[in-house]
Image (tube, rainbow, N blue to C red):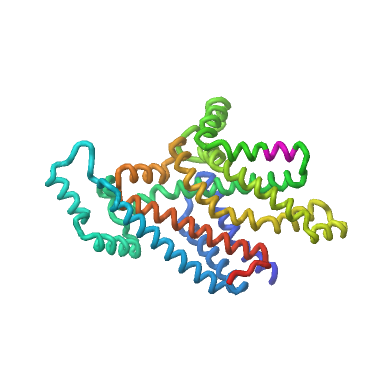
Amino acid sequence: MNGLLKVLRLAPWILFGACVLISFCGFNLNPIFIWLTLLSFVVELGLVAVKKGLVFYMLRRLGEALVTLWLIASLTFLLLRILPGGPFDEEKALPPDVKASIEAKYKLHDPLLKQYADYLKGIVTGDLGESYKYTGRNVADIITESVPDSVQLGIYSILVAYLIGIPFGVWAAARQGTWIDALLMTLAISGVAMPSFLIAPIFILIFCFGLGWFEPALWLGPAYYVLPTIVLGIRPAASIARLTRASVLEVIRSDFIRTAKAKGLEESKVLFKHVLRNSMIPVLSLTGPLVASVLTGSFVIEQIFAIPGSAKHLIQSVSNRDYPLILGMTLLFSALLVIANLITDLLISVIDPRVKMS
């Protein structure tokens, strides 16, 4: 019975791993499979919340998340209206009657409060409006078409960051003061200091045009995924490695670690079973800022590698003053950050039973 419960607890991660592997291999994911994975995570988080008495905490955080998203949506809406200029102000001015007709079509002549109320109603109903520049296209359709590639790139990069950063940080801490520690920390500092727009061309020259291992642009399969994923994941991986090293060194000096060593436990068992688990709280708390870093960094990477993600639409929407598209993209990325922070808090409570959130 206990074995079955453990398998059920691992089901969300197994499904998630399967989704990542299938998508990375270039196969199309069935939407039912994606929704099943999301549902399994929701169920798992719900069970954890009930078991640890975090139901009220989760409800409160969800309420705070909704308020946060409402404030972001409201401030973005207000700032777009306050800033000088309009979406149809161009170098070559449109005839007044044509401009008035276009603005009437998009209800820009309505009172500001009515526009705001219509906008909030659209968010609730899932209607984000029609793009001003992509004539005849709904913002929700543009997001549905472009965001999956950006999310895919972001997930791959975060996985790369943790898979590289945590082992390197543990290795450096275990070899503190040696040349290995110095080398790994030098690489970590270099990774933090060097921006993505500098690393990307260097990697393209070496691995695409020099060695011919990968493709330099587009997003059509595994050969196209590897390079932008690694380039985007290098900087967060370096931050994770430094933080992991510092956290591991702090835990290693704890009394319970000295006790475990005194009992004769193997060094590898002490390091990975006792030290690593207790060192993960600061590293996991970095997930929220890490998601923000990956999302903002992906704009540059998508432009360099010609990935058909959301970066192009977001940048063009800002330059074109495409109000509905700006609002839709801003709301989407804000929601992703809020969800990432909530999941991070819950994961911390799972890893460390001492953490109690009320």
Most common SS among magenta residues: helix
> Toward which corner of the image does residue 308 lie, by quadrant?
top left
Q: Residue at x 42, y 65 (%)?
A: 67
Residue 270, can we see it? yes
Q: How many marks?
A: 0
Q: Is residue 98 above or below residue 209?
A: below
Question: Which of 221/268 is in front?
Answer: 268
Question: Which of 112/4 is in front?
Answer: 112
Residue 140, can we see it? no
As drawn, which residue projects farthest toward the top? 210
Q: Position of residue 133 (x, y in %)?
A: 27, 45
Q: Quadrant of the N terminus?
A: bottom right
- Image check: 46 left or right of 114? right
Tell me where the magenta segment starts and ends, as one range: 180-185
Q: Is residue 218 above or below residue 117?
A: above
Q: Position of residue 348 (x, y in %)?
A: 62, 62
As drawn, which residue projects farthest toward the left? 97
Q: Position of residue 203 (x, y in %)?
A: 55, 31
Q: Residue at x 54, y 44 (%)?
A: 25
> Toward which corner of the image does residue 98 lie, by quadrant?
top left
Q: Quadrant of the C terminus?
A: bottom right
- Image check: 211 left or right of 104? right
Q: Is residue 293 magenta?
A: no
Q: Is residue 145 above or below residue 55?
A: above
Q: Residue at x 38, y 49 (%)?
A: 145
Q: Position of residue 118 (x, y in %)?
A: 27, 62
